[in-house]
Image (cartoon, coloured by chain):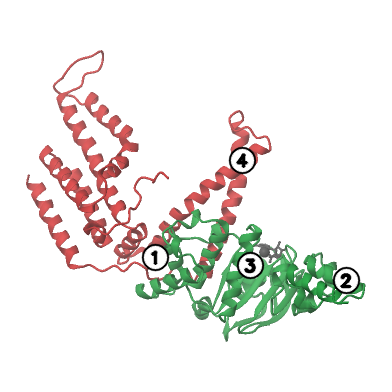
Chain colours: A red, B green
Amino acid sequence: MKEPVFSYVPGTSLLHRFDPRIKIAAVMLLGILTFRIENFEGIAALFAFFFALASLSGLPMKMFFRAIKPMMLFITFIFLAQLLFTDGKVLVSYWILQPSLEGLETGLKLAARFILLLLFAALLTASTNPSAITCGIERMLRPLPLRWLGITSFELATMMNISIAFLPLLFERVERTKAAQAARGMDFVKNPFRSVPALAIPLLRGVIRDAEELALAMESRGYQGSRRTSMHELSIQKNDWKALFVLAVFFIFVLFL
Amino acid sequence: MIRLEKVSYSYPDGTPALENINLTIKKGEFVGVIGKNGSGKSTLALQLSGLLKPGTGRVVIRGMDTRDPSRLQGIRKFVGVVFQNPETQFVGRTVEEDLAFGPENLCLPPVEIRRCVDMALAETELEKYRHRSPKTLSGGQGQCAALAGILAMRPECLIFDEVASMLDPESGIAVLETIKKLHKKGKTIVYITHNLEELHDADRILVMEKGKIKIEGDPESVFSDVFLQDLGLPLPSLIELAANLKTHGVIIPWESTTSPQNFAEEICRLFLRT
Ligand SMILES: Nc1ncnc2c1ncn2[C@@H]1O[C@H](COP(=O)(O)OP(=O)(O)O)[C@@H](O)[C@H]1O
Ligand SMILES: [Mg+2]
């Protein structure tokens, strides 16, 4: 079976054992850093940092390349746009295309930034159990006054979990409804104006019923949207502080590079 | 244990679903509930578990009135419901995470949650699927996982609403066997079905029709009740056979109608001896 990109790979490496909150904070910091860096040395340092972390995680490198691959088209597009539409010293002139040196530079940097962002995100999701990530986000959000928005951090975390768990059911329902309508002679290609409502209405009805059943099952299992605990024990260890320290040193180092 | 006093209920759109129900479920009982579609079985399950509040009358679950919001979590801990469709009962990405959902809502500490999850996995023999996505389980395993999700909360009373109706007969029997095992361990069971055959070993059977309990009694008396046919509920074939033989003067004792083997032995005993 083909594994989806950005999926969790269980393990016991140092990276796996860090507290999810530290890892989320680290990815956010590295993300900021990635877009603050102006020189190629900094970008090289970030790549080096990624490879150091990746080898620490013990995960196969090709897994990370798989995370970038689907975005490659988008990244190439951005690179080409920068390359061709930035004014500056013209490299070569071909037809109306005039790639500039400055364009090449900003294009390369921008592409590198997106790739770094994807790589760090993949590192987080591959080394952290998804529900530990939501649990970590919940704990980080808890001090925020979300009450004003009429939602608790617990509800937010449950919503994230449920939507991920529920998505496949939704796709399945789309397929089933499509098959049922096709069996009644609906032609989806020839007749889009009639087929869209014919698909949407039974689909919506089904989804609402699913949601009602799910809500009832959740309530039966004691869900109230208020305080709840988690199976994942989050506790910041000595190692987490060390990691944070290393990260801070790296941060300052790159900024001064 | 669970007591319904003069409970009536209509859905917000005005559909009447239950009418003046009086019922007591005793500790350790296995109560079967049967009736046609729309007879109010599911509504009864929701009342028995406090998921719906009665329109009129009172539902008391182990001394706790279901209309008292401060008792809600106490009621959830005491009674759980397993529904018909396993797919819409999963909230976790892995079986293990899914089972943790209930204990997490009860605010148990992480160590305790893990213990509850392990216990529920063992009880339903799902240990090897711990890290699988519940969506990838077969129908029967899925229903066992849904049951485990309730078991992880350690309730004393379990309600099953047509849990076998979406399964193939074989997995349906397997799920029922697991439920019977739980009953032997002392759990109170309410088992809702539209298949009389599954209720042969129940302590008590309630037959529902149009929101009322029409017939109530032990399986032997309910199965021989003349009103049963009027309600359009087909008898298990062995029971029907025994009833037909009875009109010809051949009496097959109730115990022998549990399986074709027992039935055959009884017939041989009756006829080969003379
Ligand atoms: N959510 C609902 N809203 C309105 N009416 C409902 C709802 N659920 C069930 N009913 C109606 O209540 C009656 C009893 O339904 P139910 O308890 O689901 O019966 P059963 O489980 O025996 O099939 C039926 O007439 C049904 O149409
Ligand atoms: Mg029903």
Q: Please give the chain letter of the residue carrying mark 4.
A: A
- Disc 3 versus disc 4: distance between alpha carbons? 29 Å
The CB of the residue at mark 4 lies under 8 Å from ligand 2:
no
Badge 2 crowding class, 10 Å Cα cut-off, few under 14, some 14 to 19, many 20 or more, is few
Q: According to the image, label 4 marks what residue?
A: A179
Q: Classify mark 3: helix, strand or loop.
A: strand
Q: Classify mark 2: helix, strand or loop.
A: helix
Q: According to the image, label 2 marks what residue?
A: B245
Mark 3–mark 1 CB contact (< 8 Å): no
Vertical comparison of A207 with B263: above or below:
above
Q: Is residue A175 visible?
A: yes
Q: According to the image, label 1 marks what residue?
A: A154
Mark 2–mark 4 CB contact (< 8 Å): no
- Disc 2 versus disc 3: distance between alpha carbons? 34 Å
Q: Please give the chain letter of the residue carrying mark 3.
A: B
- Disc 1 versus disc 2: distance between alpha carbons? 63 Å
Q: Classify mark 1: helix, strand or loop.
A: helix
Task: Residue at the far right: name it.
Answer: B248
Residue A85 in the figure: left or right of residue A88: right
Q: Is residue B69 visible?
A: no
Q: According to the image, label 3 marks what residue?
A: B161
Task: Residue at the far bottom: name it.
Answer: B63
Name the spot of residue A119 as percent of width and height, x first: 26, 45
